[in-house]
Amino acid sequence: MTGRPALTPLEAWVKTRIGLTPDRDLTSRDLDRHRIDRLRKVLIYARQNSPFYRDRLSGLADDFPRGLDDLAAIPFTTATDLRERSLDLLCVSQSDVARVVTLPIDDPAVPPRRLYFSDHDLERTVDFFHFGMTTLVRPGAAVLILMPGKTFGGIGDLLKKALARMNARGVIHGPVTDPDRALDDLEKSRADCIVGLPSQVLGLARHPRGRDLPPGRVKSVLLSADYVPRAVVRELEDRWGARVFEHYGMTEMGLGGGVQCQVREGYHLREADLLFEVVDPVTGAPRADGETGEVVFTTLTRRAMPLIRYRTGDLSRFLPGPCPCGTVLPRLDRVSGRVAGRVILGSGDMLSLPDIDEALFTIPGLLNYAAGLDAGPGVDRLTVQIYAGRRDRPEILTDVQKRLLAIPAVQQAVARGRLTLGPLSFSPADWPTSGTIKRILKDKRMEPTS
């Protein structure tokens, strides 16, 4: 293909949403004006309607901020605030709430985070999904949705509604718990696009029936809801001949945050509804373009529960320079990990879940894994349990050991006698049935021993 790649459809969407006429070119100044105007309005709205923000933002004038440099004067909102004061964050009566989402937690002693959305908030997400999906599919296409959402307001429900607006058909299967049943739905629906979690879509591609799909049968794939290993993208493209795109979002954003264009060099963001920042994870100071930090966002149009300068815990950076697609919209780089998702080994080296992802997902036959770090007598121990379609292949465990030892942080810690590997084992289950719960690198070194 020659010439410039297609302009991201999000540019036309943003132009319409911020009130520009079709003949006007979108400029960075237009974006800044929109951000400042919407930010002033949401700050006033939150102060007037939310007990939490009434206290938190009481010292701000109605004409604040005067510019985006003033953002640093606004306090952050955190996951702890959501756990401890979710009802105080509400700006509407509970009768105006259309959907409540309780985020799953591992520790029953910790209060869950609850998010509240109005019909207006859900409609904004459908609108974003509608335009974002035009990068992947055309009218008449069918999309197999391997995400939760057969209930009202779930991601599957919202995506199906968005696809209908472009005369495409969404087929909600839900998270994959039985690969044969998911592949049955793929065949019955004649879907040419799949939306799902990276590990689950990879599992379908590595299933015997998935391996037999002819190249081009699946034309595009959208991976979301978890870190996307490059090894997964490469294998899906090589095996199926599909173009693989990545989406960035979380429930706190209203599910949609950003999506790649045809160039696939960073996410173009949901600029009409969200204001993004990248800050130093320790000091909270803004990071320059190209510098990695913690992603922070502010909802600009949310009615039920606006979130102002919400710390996501995700690590990324704004990519410097314009996108080759020609848009003026900024780009957020693919998420490189979590602020709290890294562990310091006894050697002082840092190990993260993405490090393990990139090493292990290249192993043929591996579907998923669970990793943990235990405290041994004088030495830490890295344990990994493997999900594989066949457990009669010990060479998979040998491969796992080799790939783990090739990770620089692991290699250094083992060489210094501060880390051992094992046990490395197969899970008794054929398929990880955890739905959309993300993998974590569980650090159990500080847990009390029985």
Image (cartoon, rainbow, N blue to C red):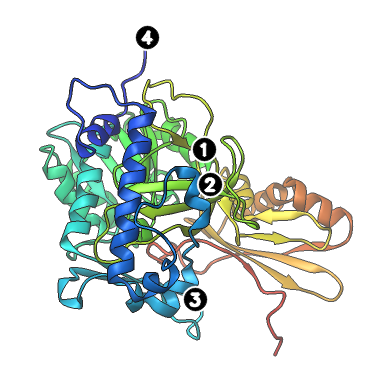
In the shown orientation, is residue 387 left or right of residue 271? Answer: right
As drawn, the residue found furthest toward the right would be: 416
Q: Tell me if label 1 and label 2 are in contact, CB under 8 Å.
A: yes
Q: Position of residue 163 (x, y in %)?
A: 17, 43
Q: Position of residue 125 (x, y in %)?
A: 24, 51
Report how far apart the C-alphas of labels 4 and 1 lie in the structure.
27 Å
Residue marked by disc 2: 278
Tell me the amino acid under the disc marked 3. Answer: Asp
Report how far apart the C-alphas of labels 1 and 3 lie in the structure.
31 Å
Q: Earlier in the sequence, mark 1 or mark 3?
A: 3
Residue at 35% in and 48% down:
274
Residue marked by disc 3: 106
In the shown orientation, is residue 370 left or right of residue 152? Answer: right
Tell me the amino acid under the disc marked 2. Answer: Val
Residue marked by disc 4: 2
Tell me the amino acid under the disc marked 1. Answer: Phe
Question: Which residue is more in the foreground, 360 or 267?
Answer: 267
Residue at 38% in and 22% down:
325
Mark 4 falls on what kind of element?
loop
Report how far apart the C-alphas of labels 2 and 3 lie in the structure.
28 Å
Which mark's residue is nearer the viewer, 2 or 4? 2
19 shown above or below 445: above
Badge 3: residue crowd in 10 Å (few <14, some 14–19, many ≥20)? few
